[in-house]
Amino acid sequence: MKSTLTRLFLLAITFIAFSATASAAKQSYYQIKIYHLKTKAQEAVIDTYLKEAFIPASHRAGVKDIGVFKPVAQDTAERLIYVFTPIKKLSDLDKINELIAKDKQYIQAGNGYLNATYDDAPYTRVESIILKAFSAMPEYALPKLNSAKSERIYELRSYEAATESLSLNKIGMFNDAEVDIFTKLNFNAVFYGQVISGSKMPNLMYLTTFNNKADRDNHWSAFGPEYKKISGLPQYQHNVSKNVTLFLYPADYSDF
């Protein structure tokens, strides 16, 4: 009898361990590519490239949804375009890029971008950020909004921390409580992710979406009282050293 119970106990432990490992393995990865531009002409080239070449080729390579976003308030000195690409695992990024590079339709449609000359480059620089999804939301989600794309507000937040341990503490705070609050209040989050490669680390980023600015403000007003319940807990102190908030809107050709 004891041996049977022991075997059942060990099987249960093994199942739990396997489930936990499988769950962790399902966490997706994301790339945020940022095009830094100076002129409207460059922006037009990138828009054409993304709309007619990159996004269709990404779809053919197996990426279902590509998000393209621009700042609501344009900087007079620099224009920015954010491109969000979800992938199942890091190795997929190379595979997708290899497939796209061999795609004849992509090569033809992207000619103006791909074969730009050194003295007429379509951008100033390209920045890439790689993120790993939080365990509390292991995959991205499409926003459920009913407003026109031009009216929407997508809020991209970046939380830097003084140390890696404090950044992990903030991620734990999200996994344990904050994601639940955002979900409860219907913030329509697209993703939450730990930056594992980027120019500003340690860092985490997440994207929430709203029908318009008033909708965004109402959601954050409701968030405050809920957040106060956890923000004062001693285990979560000093885990954010810098908060950067960007208001974006989706390009008309963005998948969401």
Image (tube, grey):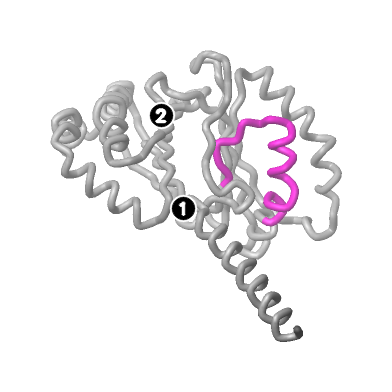
Relative to 71, is 27 above or below? below
Which amino acid type is shown beneath numbered disc 1?
Answer: Ser
* Position of residue 47 measured from the top left corner of the image (x, y, whole percent): 31, 25
Which amino acid type is shown beneath numbered disc 2?
Answer: Arg
Crowding at mark 2 (Cα within 10 Å: few <14, some 14-19, many 20+): many
Q: Which mark is residue 79?
A: 2
Segment tinted magenta in the rendering: 172-192
Residue 179 colored magenta? yes
Q: Residue at x 15, y 35 (%)?
A: 107
**SS category of the residue bearing label 1:** loop
Relative placement, left or right, of 35 versus 41 is right
Q: Nearer the viewer, residue 58 or 215?
A: 58
Q: Nearer the viewer, residue 238 or 47?
A: 47
Q: Residue at x 15, y 31 (%)?
A: 111
- What residue would you read off at disc 1? 199
- Circle nearer the N terminus (1, 2): 2
Relative placement, left or right, of 102 versus 9 is left
**SS category of the residue bearing label 2:** strand
* Position of residue 228 measured from the top left corner of the image (x, y, whole percent): 84, 42
Q: Which mark is residue 112?
A: none
Q: Residue at x 61, y 24 (%)?
A: 210
**How far is disc 1 from disc 2 in space, using C-alphas?**
19 Å
* Position of residue 215 measured from the top left corner of the image (x, y, whole percent): 68, 20
* Position of residue 137 measured from the top left corner of the image (x, y, whole percent): 60, 46
Q: On the image, which quarter does residue 152 sit in? A: top right
Relative to 234, is 147 above or below? above
Crowding at mark 1 (Cα within 10 Å: few <14, some 14-19, many 20+): few
Q: On the image, which quarter does residue 18 sit in? A: bottom right
Q: Residue at x 85, y 54 (%)?
A: 233
Q: On the image, which quarter does residue 153 sit in? A: top right
Relative placement, left or right, of 242 versus 36 is right
The residue at the far front in this view is 1
